[in-house]
Amino acid sequence: MSEFTKNEAVALTAELKDAMQLLLEKHGLKLANHHTTYGNVYRLKIEVSKPNVNDDGFDEGTREARDYRDMAGYYRLPVEALFTEFSSSGRRWRLMGLNPKARKYPVVAVDIRDGKEYKLTVEMVREALEAN
């Protein structure tokens, strides 16, 4: 029996995610997470979520946003800072949440200029929020 290679699994996953995206958008859903395994059998496990969009258009139902609300006090970050903009290192950021599994860079933020998501240190964000 022939096995799936890593390259085949990566290509197949990318195509399936693209195809699912149209269906999910049609139903107002989004792909929350996915996990693949391959070998004799290719498996794709997906998690789909229903966005919980606030008045400003941000999804409060993401894992990072929920973790931020639950754990901001532990990191000594203000809970009300979620989805706010701040300046640091000459850039403008939007605070999107926390990933507590990432010990060095647990803060999830989006660079306003390029729209890309980055991981930041708690100290950097705390200092920037205090300065704003």
Image (spheres, helix red, strand yellow):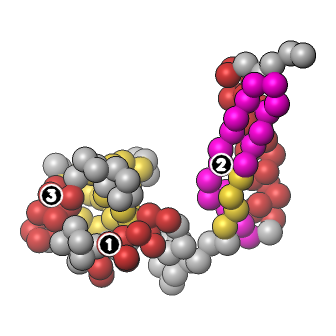
Residue for badge 1: 71
Q: Are marks 3 and 2 in contact (CB under 8 Å)?
A: no
Q: Quadrant of residue 83?
A: bottom left
Rate crowding at label 3 as few (under 14), some (14 to 19) or many (20 or more) other CA atoms within 10 Å.
Answer: some
Residue located farthest toward the right when viewing the structure as drawn: 1
State the predominant SS element of the stretch in magenta.
Answer: strand
- Of labels 2 and 1, earlier in sequence is 2
Q: Give the alpha-carbon distance from disc 3 to disc 2, as whole Å.
A: 31 Å
Q: Is residue 27 above or below residue 18?
A: below
Q: Is residue 51 above or below residue 32?
A: below
Amino acid at the residue labelled 2: His
Residue 51 in the image: x percent, y percent? 62, 72
Secondary structure found at label 2: strand
Residue 35: say if magenta.
yes
Residue 117 in the image: x percent, y percent? 41, 50
Q: Is residue 51 left or right of residue 60?
A: right
Amino acid at the residue labelled 3: Glu
Where does the magenta region start and end?
Answer: 28-45
Q: Is residue 58 visible?
A: yes
Residue 53 in the image: x percent, y percent? 56, 77
Residue 53: say if magenta.
no
